[in-house]
Image (spheres, rainbow, N blue to C red):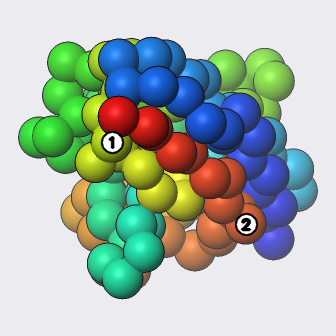
């Protein structure tokens, strides 16, 4: 089992920044590809970003490219999502997730473990 706990969400004005953190415990953190997803009210949970085990490769959904950066610190068992130039459409609950798979990392169904989520609200 892997336990994931997100933090860092909050209310920010459009154009502002936030940094989300996800602390992992349980099994060896570096064995897992990590991802961030988000879910807005009335919408499906969608992929935001993912990072490989060593951190050498990252993946992003098009709407956040150039604004969001995913990173990880395997010594601290933590994955981060730095978000800048936030827009009202970024408002959602953000979830981190872990998978032992190495393929289709943008697909939510391959992720084995999920955090409880953290709310991000961007006001216009």
**Residue assigned mark 1:** 88
In the picture shown, does residue 102 fall above or below 121? below
The residue nearer to you, when weighing 22 against 91, is 91
Q: In the orientation shown, which residue stands out farthest toward the right?
A: 26
The residue nearer to you, when weighing 90 against 49, is 90
User: What residue is shown at x 49% (from left), y 70% (from top)?
Assistant: 111
In the picture shown, does residue 94 fall above or below 78? below
Across and down, in percent, residue 82 comes to 49, 21
State the CA–CA distance, disc 2 to disc 1. Answer: 22 Å
* Mark closer to the observer (2, 1): 1
**Residue assigned mark 2:** 116
Across and down, in percent, residue 108 comes to 37, 72
Looking at the rendered structure, the secondary structure element under dot 1 is: helix
The residue nearer to you, when weighing 34 against 6, is 6
Looking at the rendered structure, the secondary structure element under dot 2 is: loop
Q: Is residue 35 in sight in this rendering?
A: no
Mark drawn on residue 105: none
The residue nearer to you, when weighing 124 against 79, is 124
Q: In the orientation shown, which residue stands out farthest toward the front?
A: 124
Across and down, in percent, residue 121 comes to 52, 45
Badge 2 crowding class, 10 Å Cα cut-off, few under 14, some 14 to 19, many 20 or more, is some
State the image quarter where residue 106 is shown.
bottom left
User: What residue is shown at x 82% (from left), y 61% (from top)?
Assistant: 3
Quarter of the C terminus within the rendering: top left
State the image quarter where residue 14 is shown.
top left
In the picture shown, does residue 69 fall above or below 62? above
Relative placement, left or right, of 24 versus 44 is right
């Amino acid at each position: 089992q892997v336990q994931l706990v997100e933090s860092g969400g909050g209310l920010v004005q459009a154009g502002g920044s936030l940094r989300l953190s996800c602390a992992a415990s349980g099994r060896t953190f570096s064995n897992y590809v990590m991802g961030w997803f988000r879910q807005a009210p009335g919408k499906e949970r969608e992929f935001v970003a993912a990072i490989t085990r060593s951190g050498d490769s990252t993946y992003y959904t098009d709407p956040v490219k150039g604004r969001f950066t995913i990173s990880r610190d395997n010594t601290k068992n933590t994955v981060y999502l730095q978000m800048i130039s936030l827009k009202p459409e970024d408002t959602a609950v953000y979830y981190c997730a872990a998978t032992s798979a190495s393929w289709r990392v943008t697909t939510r169904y391959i992720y084995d473990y999920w955090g409880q989520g953290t709310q991000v609200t961007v006001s216009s």
